């Protein structure tokens, strides 16, 4: 998954500077010129009030600021979002170019989403894991956007508010769920490493004055104490709260459909996508059984094929899954595979690459572990040439049994598909293209369904090009992986809306998704601490694939796959329906 979190509830926007322009000057500007000025002020004011997110996308002007998540801050956010929506309404969207009109829609969606998160969803009350300062401090430390001495001074200033940040977090939390509390404890324990080891480890070689060093060390100690106090408070809260008092982590149908609308931006409703996923699951099972029949004489000829198709498929997958890398070589093997996969994509001319934009495979930082085993941290459009990090969690903390289960899940074939998804031509390649988009709005306000959907689509793209020599084993394992995206949607809806319990969920993941116990357990946990995000993979994939097939039909022999891919990615991280509208217009094709 793409680990980069778009925390829409932190949208804090103001465009008051727009009102200083004289009426006479405004009247001389075209609608697009007015909107361009609107965007410029919008973005700078946005980053001044959401500096952490700004730093994440490479906008470092306010990198030393850490807002305190208290009620006063939330009230300020609410006023700014309401004011900005009113200012946005004053612009005539009908007179804008298609590019600006779609930027308009993206901004509006984020503002409306931000208000909904504040006033309806109220995650700040029940999700303690959303309070964690380590990510941005780690990013400032590891990104060489200015000399180390200056970054350490930035860190010193930013550290000042850490104690107040965690004190405000405690006052904000009123009804935490057990699942989000567990995650908060785990991740904040990982966060301590940033302040106890990573930052202190850089001080000795820096050119800070003795006074600066003392101040930095004092603030690091205060930050560490604040985080430790937060962890202790959460642990005490857990111990003192009875099971009857703990709120359900499920959000229910009404909130789920609303969150789906804002987060996914789809042509489907959540329920419609759920029903589509059920049909796709059945189709995948049919295709996987045909491959199993083909492979049976080669691997399991001494055994009778079970009459139950799902049992037969699982037997074949179980047999093949024994081929995997050793646990100690897991990260090393991923590093080895990356140039091979890159070469296949380039040789088959699937889309453009850029060797000047580096990909760094690394062990995932401690403060990012606990949500996904592999993820990508990509630079934002303001610092597009910075490193992209492929974070891989090593198996150091696994028992032998857990490690074997995990490695069987990410076996010889599926590990390759994972690398395609996370890196090339998946997240790494797509986000590299996104950072070249002329529209920062489309890159910054990234649509999760497009980003994750592209990664899933990229797997099919490589398979269709013959990756893995078209071996049936590769196709079977790819189908198992593709089935994961489909079942993600089914699982998330059934848990969050229909009340599915853990045993039923684990059984579906293992019996119908052919997943290993460790993977199924991890997915259950993920589905309890997130909502809707698991649907983004299949939704985006389905919409991208449908659009590709639509263009093939409209263009006939003029359709070129590489041209389609490059053009599609040129629109940044826009929702697929937005990209479809832009491409059809630009290519002079009818918009049905």
Image (cartoon, helix red, strand yellow):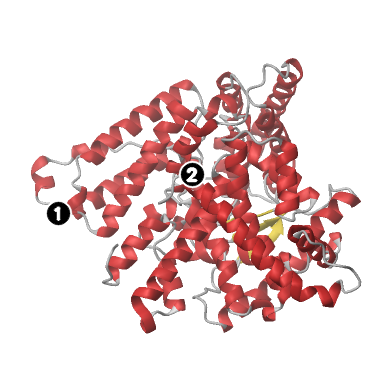
Q: In this orientation, which residue lies closer to the viewer: 36 or 506?
A: 506
In this view, the residue farthest toward the front is 307
Q: In this orientation, which residue lies closer to the viewer: 63 or 190?
A: 190
Task: Kindly identify the residue that appears in the image at 39 percent across and 55 percent down.
Answer: 442
Position of residue 453 in the picture relative to residue 225 (left or right): left
Task: Kindly identify the residue that appears in the image at 56 percent across and 35 percent down.
Answer: 497
Query: x and y percent of residue 105 in the render?
Result: 32, 48
User: Can you say which quadrant of the picture contains the N terminus?
Assistant: bottom right
Q: Earlier in the sequence, mark 2 or mark 1?
A: 1
Count of marks, rendered view:
2
Q: Secondary structure at mark 1?
A: loop
Query: x and y percent of residue 63 in the render?
Result: 50, 43
Q: Is residue 65 above or below residue 483?
A: above
Q: Secondary structure at mark 2?
A: helix
Q: Is residue 584 above or below residue 94?
A: below
In the rendered structure, find residue 270 and report the number of the disc placed on it. 2
User: Can you say which quadrant of the picture contains the C terminus?
Assistant: bottom left
- Quarter where residue 188 is shown: top right
Position of residue 459 in the picture relative to residue 258 (left or right): right
Task: Kindly identify the residue that appears in the image at 58 percent across and 43 percent down.
Answer: 136
> Residue 1: in sight, yes or no?
no
Q: In this orientation, which residue lies closer to the viewer: 571 or 472?
A: 472
Query: x and y percent of residue 277 in the render?
Result: 56, 53
- Quarter where residue 573 is shown: bottom left
Which residue is the site of mark 1? 30
Query: x and y percent of residue 274 in the render?
Result: 53, 47
Position of residue 241 in the picture relative to residue 17 (left or right): right
Q: Are marks 2 and 1 in contact (CB under 8 Å)?
A: no
Q: In this orientation, which residue lies closer to the viewer: 64 or 302?
A: 302
Local packing at callout 1 (Cα closer than 10 Å; few below 14, some 14-19, many 20+) is: few
């Amino acid at each position: 998954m793409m680990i980069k979190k778009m925390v829409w509830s932190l949208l804090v926007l103001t465009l008051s500077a727009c009102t200083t322009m004289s009426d006479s000057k405004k009247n001389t500007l075209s609608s697009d010129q007015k909107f361009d000025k609107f965007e410029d002020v919008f973005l700078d004011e946005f980053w001044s009030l959401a500096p952490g997110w700004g730093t994440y996308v490479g906008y470092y002007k306010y990198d030393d600021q850490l807002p305190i998540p208290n009620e006063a801050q939330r009230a300020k956010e609410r006023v700014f979002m309401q004011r900005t929506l009113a200012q946005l309404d004053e612009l005539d969207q009908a007179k804008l170019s298609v590019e600006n009109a779609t930027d308009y829609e993206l901004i509006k969606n984020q503002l409306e989403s931000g208000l909904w998160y504040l006033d309806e969803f109220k995650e700040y009350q029940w999700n303690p894991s959303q309070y964690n300062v380590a990510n941005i401090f780690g990013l400032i430390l590891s990104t060489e956007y200015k000399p180390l001495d200056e970054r350490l001074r930035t860190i010193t200033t930013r550290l000042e508010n850490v104690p107040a940040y965690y004190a405000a977090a405690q006052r904000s939390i009123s009804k935490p769920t057990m699942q989000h509390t567990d995650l908060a404890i785990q991740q904040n324990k990982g966060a301590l490493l940033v302040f106890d080891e990573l930052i202190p480890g850089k001080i000795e070689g820096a050119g800070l004055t003795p006074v600066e060093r003392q101040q930095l060390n004092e603030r690091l100690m205060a930050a560490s104490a604040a985080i430790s106090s937060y962890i202790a408070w959460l642990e005490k809260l857990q111990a003192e709260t009875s099971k009857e008092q703990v709120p359900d982590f499920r959000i229910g149908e009404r909130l789920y459909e609303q969150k789906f609308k804002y987060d996914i931006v789809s042509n489907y409703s959540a329920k419609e996508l759920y029903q589509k996923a059920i049909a796709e699951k059945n189709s995948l099972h049919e295709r996987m059984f045909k491959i199993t029949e083909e492979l049976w004489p080669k691997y399991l000829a001494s055994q009778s094929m079970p009459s139950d198709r799902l049992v037969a498929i699982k037997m074949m997958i179980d047999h093949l899954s024994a081929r995997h890398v050793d646990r100690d070589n897991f990260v090393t093997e991923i590093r080895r595979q990356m140039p091979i996969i890159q070469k296949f994509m380039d040789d088959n001319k699937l889309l453009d690459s850029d060797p000047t934009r580096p990909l760094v495979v690394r062990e995932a930082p401690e403060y990012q572990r606990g949500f996904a085993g592999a993820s990508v941290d990509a630079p934002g459009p303001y610092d597009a040439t910075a490193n992209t990090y492929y974070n891989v969690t090593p198996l150091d903390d696994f028992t032998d049994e857990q490690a074997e289960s995990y490695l069987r899940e990410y076996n010889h074939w599926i590990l390759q598909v994972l690398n395609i998804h996370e890196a090339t031509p998946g997240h790494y390649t797509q986000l590299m293209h996104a950072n070249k988009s002329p529209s920062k709005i489309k890159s910054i306000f990234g649509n999760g369904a497009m980003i994750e959907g592209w990664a899933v689509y990229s797997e099919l793209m490589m398979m269709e090009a013959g990756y893995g020599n078209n071996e049936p084993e590769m196709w079977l394992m790819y189908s198992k992986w593709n089935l994961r995206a489909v079942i993600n949607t089914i699982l998330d809806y059934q848990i969050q809306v229909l009340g599915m319990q853990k045993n039923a969920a684990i059984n579906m993941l293992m019996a119908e998704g052919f997943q290993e116990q460790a993977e199924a357990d991890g997915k259950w946990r993920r589905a309890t601490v997130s909502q809707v995000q698991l649907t983004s993979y299949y939704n985006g994939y389905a919409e991208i694939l449908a659009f590709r097939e639509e263009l093939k039909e409209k263009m006939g022999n003029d359709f070129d796959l590489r041209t389609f891919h490059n053009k599609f990615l040129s629109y940044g991280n826009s929702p697929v329906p937005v990209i479809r509208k832009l491409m059809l217009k630009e290519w002079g094709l009818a918009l049905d």
